[in-house]
Amino acid sequence: MTALPPNDAMITAMDVDHPEYDQPWDHRERGETEAERLDRNWASLLQELRVTQTGVQLLTGFLLTLPFQQRFDLLGDTMRAVYLATVGCSVGATVALIAPVGMHRLLFRRHRLLVLVSAAHRSAYAGLVLLGLALTGVTVIIFDAVSGHAAGIIAGTCALALFAVFWLLVPLWLRSRNLKLRDS
Protein backbone atom coordinates (compact mmCIF):
# COMPACT_ATOMS: atom_id res chain seq x y z
CA MET A 1 0.00 0.00 0.00
CA THR A 2 1.32 3.45 -0.92
CA ALA A 3 1.89 5.86 1.95
CA LEU A 4 -0.31 8.92 1.93
CA PRO A 5 1.24 12.36 2.25
CA PRO A 6 0.84 14.18 5.56
CA ASN A 7 -1.61 17.08 5.96
CA ASP A 8 0.87 19.50 4.45
CA ALA A 9 0.88 17.47 1.22
CA MET A 10 1.38 20.55 -0.94
CA ILE A 11 4.72 21.20 0.75
CA THR A 12 5.99 17.63 0.62
CA ALA A 13 4.57 16.62 -2.76
CA MET A 14 7.28 15.70 -5.24
CA ASP A 15 9.80 15.54 -2.40
CA VAL A 16 12.84 13.55 -3.47
CA ASP A 17 12.98 11.99 0.00
CA HIS A 18 9.36 10.79 -0.27
CA PRO A 19 8.76 9.58 -3.83
CA GLU A 20 5.90 7.45 -2.57
CA TYR A 21 3.85 10.65 -2.23
CA ASP A 22 3.99 11.06 -6.02
CA GLN A 23 2.88 7.50 -6.74
CA PRO A 24 -0.92 8.03 -6.46
CA TRP A 25 -0.77 11.13 -8.68
CA ASP A 26 1.52 9.48 -11.24
CA HIS A 27 -0.71 6.42 -11.37
CA ARG A 28 -3.93 8.45 -11.63
CA GLU A 29 -2.74 11.15 -14.08
CA ARG A 30 -0.17 9.23 -16.14
CA GLY A 31 -1.18 5.63 -15.63
CA GLU A 32 2.38 4.94 -14.45
CA THR A 33 3.61 2.19 -12.24
CA GLU A 34 6.39 2.96 -9.78
CA ALA A 35 8.93 1.35 -12.12
CA GLU A 36 7.73 3.47 -15.05
CA ARG A 37 7.95 6.62 -12.91
CA LEU A 38 11.50 5.76 -11.87
CA ASP A 39 12.46 5.09 -15.50
CA ARG A 40 10.97 8.46 -16.53
CA ASN A 41 12.72 10.27 -13.66
CA TRP A 42 16.04 8.61 -14.54
CA ALA A 43 15.67 9.55 -18.23
CA SER A 44 14.82 13.13 -17.26
CA LEU A 45 17.86 13.38 -14.99
CA LEU A 46 20.11 11.98 -17.70
CA GLN A 47 18.87 14.58 -20.17
CA GLU A 48 19.53 17.39 -17.68
CA LEU A 49 23.02 16.03 -17.04
CA ARG A 50 23.75 15.78 -20.78
CA VAL A 51 22.95 19.47 -21.15
CA THR A 52 25.46 20.48 -18.48
CA GLN A 53 28.21 17.89 -18.83
CA THR A 54 29.74 19.12 -22.07
CA GLY A 55 29.84 22.72 -20.90
CA VAL A 56 31.36 21.94 -17.52
CA GLN A 57 33.95 19.65 -19.10
CA LEU A 58 34.97 22.36 -21.58
CA LEU A 59 35.15 24.94 -18.79
CA THR A 60 37.30 22.65 -16.66
CA GLY A 61 39.61 21.88 -19.57
CA PHE A 62 39.97 25.58 -20.34
CA LEU A 63 40.76 26.40 -16.71
CA LEU A 64 43.34 23.63 -16.50
CA THR A 65 45.28 25.14 -19.42
CA LEU A 66 45.44 28.69 -18.01
CA PRO A 67 48.60 28.26 -15.88
CA PHE A 68 50.47 27.40 -19.06
CA GLN A 69 49.57 30.70 -20.76
CA GLN A 70 52.05 33.61 -20.82
CA ARG A 71 49.87 36.14 -19.00
CA PHE A 72 49.07 33.81 -16.10
CA ASP A 73 52.22 35.00 -14.31
CA LEU A 74 50.71 38.50 -14.21
CA LEU A 75 47.95 37.36 -11.83
CA GLY A 76 48.37 38.60 -8.29
CA ASP A 77 48.02 36.42 -5.21
CA THR A 78 44.33 37.23 -4.79
CA MET A 79 43.47 36.30 -8.36
CA ARG A 80 45.55 33.13 -8.11
CA ALA A 81 43.48 32.18 -5.06
CA VAL A 82 40.27 32.95 -6.99
CA TYR A 83 41.62 30.88 -9.88
CA LEU A 84 42.40 27.90 -7.64
CA ALA A 85 38.97 28.09 -5.99
CA THR A 86 37.39 28.31 -9.44
CA VAL A 87 39.30 25.27 -10.68
CA GLY A 88 38.28 23.39 -7.54
CA CYS A 89 34.62 24.25 -8.12
CA SER A 90 34.85 23.36 -11.80
CA VAL A 91 36.50 20.00 -11.14
CA GLY A 92 33.98 19.35 -8.36
CA ALA A 93 31.13 20.19 -10.74
CA THR A 94 32.57 17.86 -13.36
CA VAL A 95 32.83 15.03 -10.84
CA ALA A 96 29.33 15.61 -9.41
CA LEU A 97 27.68 15.87 -12.83
CA ILE A 98 29.38 12.73 -14.14
CA ALA A 99 28.97 10.75 -10.88
CA PRO A 100 25.51 9.39 -11.80
CA VAL A 101 27.13 7.48 -14.67
CA GLY A 102 29.48 5.71 -12.25
CA MET A 103 26.63 5.13 -9.81
CA HIS A 104 24.55 3.60 -12.58
CA ARG A 105 27.39 1.34 -13.64
CA LEU A 106 27.87 0.02 -10.09
CA LEU A 107 24.13 -0.38 -9.44
CA PHE A 108 23.25 -1.71 -12.90
CA ARG A 109 20.91 -4.73 -12.80
CA ARG A 110 20.66 -4.61 -9.02
CA HIS A 111 17.10 -3.20 -8.97
CA ARG A 112 18.21 -0.07 -7.12
CA LEU A 113 16.73 2.58 -9.42
CA LEU A 114 15.02 4.39 -6.52
CA VAL A 115 18.38 4.80 -4.77
CA LEU A 116 20.05 5.75 -8.04
CA VAL A 117 17.48 8.42 -8.96
CA SER A 118 17.65 9.95 -5.47
CA ALA A 119 21.47 9.97 -5.40
CA ALA A 120 21.72 11.32 -8.96
CA HIS A 121 19.25 14.08 -8.07
CA ARG A 122 21.46 15.19 -5.16
CA SER A 123 24.59 14.87 -7.27
CA ALA A 124 23.04 17.09 -9.95
CA TYR A 125 22.15 19.72 -7.34
CA ALA A 126 25.72 19.70 -6.00
CA GLY A 127 27.15 19.85 -9.52
CA LEU A 128 24.97 22.82 -10.48
CA VAL A 129 25.92 24.74 -7.32
CA LEU A 130 29.61 24.12 -8.03
CA LEU A 131 29.14 25.04 -11.69
CA GLY A 132 27.50 28.33 -10.68
CA LEU A 133 30.42 29.09 -8.34
CA ALA A 134 32.95 28.16 -11.04
CA LEU A 135 31.28 30.43 -13.60
CA THR A 136 31.21 33.21 -11.02
CA GLY A 137 34.94 32.71 -10.43
CA VAL A 138 35.67 32.79 -14.16
CA THR A 139 33.69 36.04 -14.41
CA VAL A 140 35.74 37.57 -11.58
CA ILE A 141 39.04 36.52 -13.16
CA ILE A 142 38.17 37.79 -16.64
CA PHE A 143 36.78 41.15 -15.51
CA ASP A 144 39.69 41.60 -13.11
CA ALA A 145 42.22 40.91 -15.88
CA VAL A 146 40.51 43.20 -18.38
CA SER A 147 39.21 46.07 -16.23
CA GLY A 148 40.70 45.78 -12.73
CA HIS A 149 39.79 44.51 -9.26
CA ALA A 150 36.68 46.64 -8.79
CA ALA A 151 35.21 45.47 -12.09
CA GLY A 152 36.02 41.87 -11.16
CA ILE A 153 34.23 42.17 -7.83
CA ILE A 154 31.20 43.88 -9.37
CA ALA A 155 30.98 41.37 -12.24
CA GLY A 156 31.38 38.43 -9.87
CA THR A 157 28.68 39.78 -7.58
CA CYS A 158 26.36 40.27 -10.56
CA ALA A 159 27.08 36.76 -11.87
CA LEU A 160 26.44 35.22 -8.46
CA ALA A 161 23.21 37.20 -8.13
CA LEU A 162 22.07 36.03 -11.58
CA PHE A 163 22.74 32.40 -10.68
CA ALA A 164 20.89 32.83 -7.39
CA VAL A 165 17.91 34.39 -9.15
CA PHE A 166 17.63 32.07 -12.17
CA TRP A 167 18.87 28.80 -10.67
CA LEU A 168 17.33 29.13 -7.21
CA LEU A 169 14.75 31.86 -6.65
CA VAL A 170 12.82 31.53 -9.93
CA PRO A 171 12.50 27.72 -9.62
CA LEU A 172 11.45 28.04 -5.97
CA TRP A 173 8.90 30.69 -6.92
CA LEU A 174 7.56 28.54 -9.76
CA ARG A 175 7.34 25.54 -7.45
CA SER A 176 5.46 27.48 -4.77
CA ARG A 177 3.18 29.04 -7.41
CA ASN A 178 2.43 25.60 -8.85
CA LEU A 179 1.60 24.24 -5.39
CA LYS A 180 -0.75 27.16 -4.72
CA LEU A 181 -2.50 26.64 -8.08
CA ARG A 182 -3.02 22.95 -7.35
CA ASP A 183 -4.36 23.83 -3.89
CA SER A 184 -7.06 26.18 -5.27
Image (cartoon, helix red, strand yellow):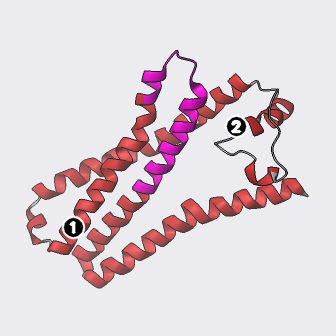
In the rendered image of this protein, does residue 39 appear above or below residue 98?
Answer: above
Q: Which mark is residue 32?
A: none
In this view, the residue in front, 58 or 109, is 109
Q: Which residues are magenta?
A: 103-130
Picture quarter containing residue 112? top right
Please tell me how crowded label 1 is: few (under 14), some (14-19), or many (20+) other residues with Cα within 10 Å.
few
In this view, the residue in front, 126 or 71, is 126
Residue that carries the numbered disc 1 in the rendered image: 81
Q: Quadrant of the N terminus?
A: top right
Residue located 40% across and 29% down the image = 102
Picture quarter containing residue 147? bottom left
In the rendered image of this protein, does residue 46 appear above or below residue 58?
Answer: above
Residue located 34% across and 68% down the image = 139
* Element class at badge 1: helix
Find residue 29 and report its horizontal and vertical position in percent.
Answer: 84, 34
Tell me the amino acid under the disc marked 2. Pro
Give the number of marks.
2
Q: Which mark is residue 19?
A: 2
Find residue 119 and report its horizontal and vertical position in percent.
Answer: 52, 37
Tell me the amino acid under the disc marked 1. Ala
Q: Quadrant of the C terminus?
A: bottom right
- Residue furthest to the bottom: 150
In this view, the residue in front, 96 or 56, is 96
Left/right of residue 160 with respect to residue 25 in the rendered view: left
Left/right of residue 111 with respect to residue 57 in the rendered view: right
First reached walking from the N terminus: tag 2 or tag 1: 2
Find residue 183 and report its horizontal and vertical position in percent.
Answer: 88, 55
* Element class at badge 2: helix
Find residue 121 and report its horizontal and vertical position in percent.
Answer: 55, 41
- Residue furthest to the top: 109
Verify CB contact (< 8 Å) between mark 2 and mark 1.
no
